[in-house]
Each structure stands twice: as C-alpha cells, then as structure tokens.
Image (tube, rainbow, N blue to C red):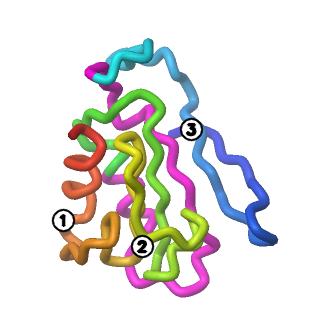
Amino acid sequence: MGQGEDQEAGGRRRRVTVPADRDAPGASSGGDDAAVTRAAGLRVVYCGGCNPHIDRGALANELETAPVFARPGSVVYLSGCPRACASGHQLATDDPAAAVVAGAQVDGVQVPAAQIAAAVSAKLKE
C-alpha cells in the first residue's frame, strides 16, 4: 500500500494515498490513452469519514488488491456518504481517469455496495 499524506481542501482535511512505487511490475508509463496500470497505481482520495454509509477501508483494499486495470494516473475519490466530500461535493466526473464514490453511488449512479469496486474498475478502464 502507498504512503499517505494529508491535504487541505476547502477548509477540510482529506487523506490521499500515494502509490509507494510507481515503477512496480505491471505499471505502464506514457500518455497513451490505451495504456493501463495495475490497481496498485491508483491514487485514492478519502473524505473525513464522519458519516460512512459504506466501508471505505474495505473498498479501498479491494481496489488495491484486485486484478484491476486502470489508466495511468487514475484517481478514486472515495467518500463514505452521498455528500461526496472527497471530490469537493461533485457526485460525478467526466474524466475517464477518475471515479467518484459517494456512499453507494459511483459517478452519481446507485450501485449495490457489493458491486462498487467492479463499477469503479469498469469506469476506469473504459
């Protein structure tokens, strides 16, 4: 798992996971849209965790350990509830290298909790 760092955003602190080794096996570099990187290269931005409707830690662990492929530089904004604090209260993004999880929603679409990781994976490899 990567190292964490705190960032200030709009007066609120949020935790960002930074990949420990960007040159790990399975990682791909370059700006080619078709290039992919293993899930270990995902950057995960967490909300403050004040009102979790989902288990953010378990979801992040599933994303980091599953054999998921994503575009280089992909980021998951992981908020425990529909307020979407990790993404600055944006419920969705058009960025193909980013996914917003806000409670049981992925980019504004309600998803069963057990399928959130799969929905994020599908979004990031589109």
Of the two numbered discs 2 and 1 on the same chain, state the one appearing first in sequence.
2
- Taking the spot 75% from the left edge, 71% from the top edge, the residue there is 12
- Taking the spot 33% from the left edge, 49% from the top edge, the residue there is 63
Q: Name the residue under label 3.
A: 2
Q: Distance between the residues labelled 3 and 1?
A: 24 Å
Q: Nearer the viewer, residue 89 or 25?
A: 89
User: Residue 85, percent across and down?
Assistant: 58, 72
Disc 2 to disc 3: CB gap under 8 Å:
no
The residue lying furthest to the front in this view is: 94
Relative to 55, is 119 above or below? above
- Secondary structure under tag 1 reads helix
Quadrant of the rendered image containing residue 14: bottom right
Verify whether residue 113 appears in magenta.
Answer: no
- Secondary structure under tag 3 reads loop
Of the two numbered discs 3 and 1 on the same chain, state the one appearing first in sequence.
3
Q: Name the residue under label 1.
A: 115
Q: How far apart are marks 2 and 3 (CA)?
A: 22 Å
User: What span is in magenta?
Assistant: 34-62
The amino acid on which the numbered mark 1 sits, given as a three-letter code, is Gln
Disc 2 to disc 1: CB gap under 8 Å:
no
- Taking the spot 44% from the left edge, 13% from the top edge, the residue there is 30
Nearest-to-viewer mark from 2 and 1: 2
Nearest-to-viewer mark from 3 and 1: 1
Q: Name the residue under label 2.
A: 102
Verify whether residue 43 appears in magenta.
Answer: yes
